[in-house]
Image: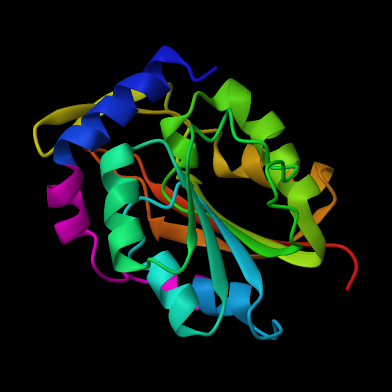
Amino acid sequence: MPSSEEQRNQTAYDRIGPQWAAARNGFFGQERTFLDALLEGLPASSLILDAGCGAGRPMAEAVVARGHRVLGVDQSRVLLDLARQRLPGERWVLCPLTDYDFGGAGGERDAVRGIICWDALFHIPRQRHQELLRRMACRLAPGGRLMLTSGGSEHPPFTDEMFGEEFFYDSHPPQTLRSIVRGLGLQVLMDEFLNPPTTGRDKGRYALLAQKAGS
């Protein structure tokens, strides 16, 4: 079951869906570098699971433009409808990430070569992160890659506003996240702060790319 914080975020994203989709229409900073590294060397038409896909831009849209397939999962019906309109040939699943069966139930057992969890993990209470990441790692094909963002500081859970709606945020600090990922048998290939934490409002945004053993 999604937590009360996740449910609150879902309601908030539904309310601001069109505004958020209009604002989130391109890559920022090193985001494209991380996506290029995720997709490097993959066979044509590889399946990429976008966990917390939002409205499908820019990540899912760029994946499809590179000749791959997308399976997008999000808990916001409004954002998912926008993704479906933008990329009608892909698969879209309405479901909270903490409820989603990453094992591939419902005919979704195709090998997943990459998983994107971009700006979604930090909306979920940190005590649920390790289990969620474990399920993602299990779904990856051997040699598959996981690309994610998290918060970038030691701060406790907090709320902040976006387009007038309140959102919940929580994250392990980067060193703890790296330890969790390595403990799941993934090798960290890249990691860096996309937004370093400040003494003000910005608590930081940290990105990581890891690879599962095998080929």
Quarter of the image for residue 61 reads bottom left
* Depth check, front residue: 102 or 126: 102
- 121 is higher (above) or lower (below) than 58: above
> Can I make out residue 30 in this image?
no
Is 150 magenta? The answer is no
The quadrant of the image that shows the N terminus is: top right
Magenta-highlighted residues:
17-34
Q: Is residue 33 left or right of residue 212?
A: left
* Position above or below: 46 against 76: below
In the image, residue 208 above or below residue 179: below
User: What residue is drawn where x is 65% and y is 64%?
Assistant: 114
Give the residue at x 36% y 46%.
197
Does the magenta-highlighted stretch encompass residue 21? Answer: yes
Mark count: 0
Q: Residue furthest right?
A: 214
In the figure, 115 relative to 200: above or below? below
The residue lying toward the viewer, choosing from 175 and 140, is 140
Residue found at the very far left of the displayed protein: 164
The spot of residue 30 in percent (x, y) is 41, 72
Front in this rendered view, residue 147 or 197: 147
Residue 64: tell me if it is visible. yes
Residue placed farthest to the top in the image? 4
Q: State the image coordinates of residue 150 (x, y, percent, origin top left).
A: 49, 44
**Image quadrant containing the C terminus:** bottom right
- What main secondary structure does the magenta stretch of the protein show? helix
The residue depicted at 80 percent of the width and 46 percent of the height is 138
Q: Residue at x 32, y 29 (%)?
A: 10
Residue 117 in percent (x, y) is at: 52, 51
80 or 33: nearer the viewer: 80
Residue 9 location (% of width, % of height): 32, 28
Q: Please say which color scheme the image uses.
A: rainbow
